[in-house]
Amino acid sequence: MLSKSLFMPAIAGVLFVLSSCGGASDKTGTEKSASDTAAAASSTVTTVTPVSTIVTTSQSMFLVKHKVASFAKWLISYEAHDSMRLANGLHNYVIGRGMADSNTIMVAVKADDMAKAKAFATNANLKEAMQKGGVTGKPVFYFFTTVFQDTATISSAMRAFATFPVKDWAAWEKGFKEGQQERIENGITDRVYGHDADDDHKVMLVTAILDSAKAFTYVNSDKNKKRRSDAGVIGEPERFAFRIVKRY
């Protein structure tokens, strides 16, 4: 018969092996749990809602178109009179130069109060400032209530400004919206549209020209003329093609 003392080391060895195996199993379980938690956390995705570039809140704008003797001289004078515009609730927005004549300027400012903007247009101080800046000829003023703006950044600085009378604002807007895809296919995207501050039968529209050859062909096409007629446009629009040279 074997001595009892001979079994003791063997039992101790078995217990050591069993306890070691059990410890490894516990550790693996702990590590797996931590790994699963980290994986679950990393798989959580935060959804970010894209910011819309479309503005449909009405905005009052004051536009001026005129010729200058020298654009560089005029711009210095224009920016020197910022305080005069601010005092009348006007905020710099965009400056454009004509594509046919780069000394024909289009200035757009945002207006806090349209009545003040109209009063400013007849102010003797404005007339004097224009003369000092080298404005030649009689300026044309537009008082514009926008109902749509697309503020997305695009590659082209070419724009077309158009004004025209319509039979009915709602009917025109409906027809205009229906033609959006057709314009896009012909290199034109809508940027701003609205109407005269006092008469919604006088539409004002700014479009971006992404493909000038396609755009100018389409604008003069029978297809576009029919679309305008169906929407209630009266006569031929007055157009001014320009390139944006400064934004504020």
Image (cartoon, rainbow, N blue to C red):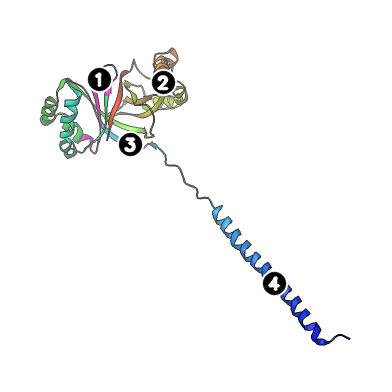
Q: How far apart are marks 3 and 1 (CA)?
A: 30 Å
Describe the element under mark 1 as helix, strand or loop: loop
- The quarter of the image holding the C terminus is top left
Q: How far apart are marks 3 and 4 (CA)?
A: 76 Å
Q: Nearer the viewer, mark 3 or mark 2?
A: 2
Instruction: Assess whether residue 239 is covered by the magenta stretch.
Output: no
Q: Distance between the residues labelled 1 and 4?
A: 87 Å
Q: According to the image, label 4 marks what residue?
A: 20
Q: Which of marks 1 and 4 is in front?
A: 4
Q: Which amino acid does label 2 sit on?
A: Asp
The residue under the point 18% across, 33% down is 79
Q: According to the image, label 3 marks what residue?
A: 58
Q: Which of marks 3 and 2 is nearer the N terminus?
A: 3
9 shown above or below 49:
below
Q: Nearer the viewer, mark 4 or mark 2?
A: 4
Q: Which of 107 and 78 is in front in this view?
A: 78
**Residue extent of the magenta highlight:** 97-115
Q: Are marks 3 and 2 in contact (CB under 8 Å)?
A: no
Q: Distance between the residues labelled 2 and 1?
A: 20 Å
Q: According to the image, label 2 marks what residue?
A: 211
For disc 2, the neighbor class at 10 Å (few under 14, some 14 to 19, many from 20) is: some
**x then y, percent, for residue 204:** 32, 25
Q: Distance between the residues labelled 3 and 2?
A: 29 Å
Q: What residue type is labelled 4?
A: Ser
Q: Are marks 2 and 1 in contact (CB under 8 Å)?
A: no
Q: Residue 102 carries which label?
A: 1
The residue under the point 40% across, 18% down is 215
The residue under the point 54% across, 54% down is 42
Snapshot quadrant of residue 15? bottom right
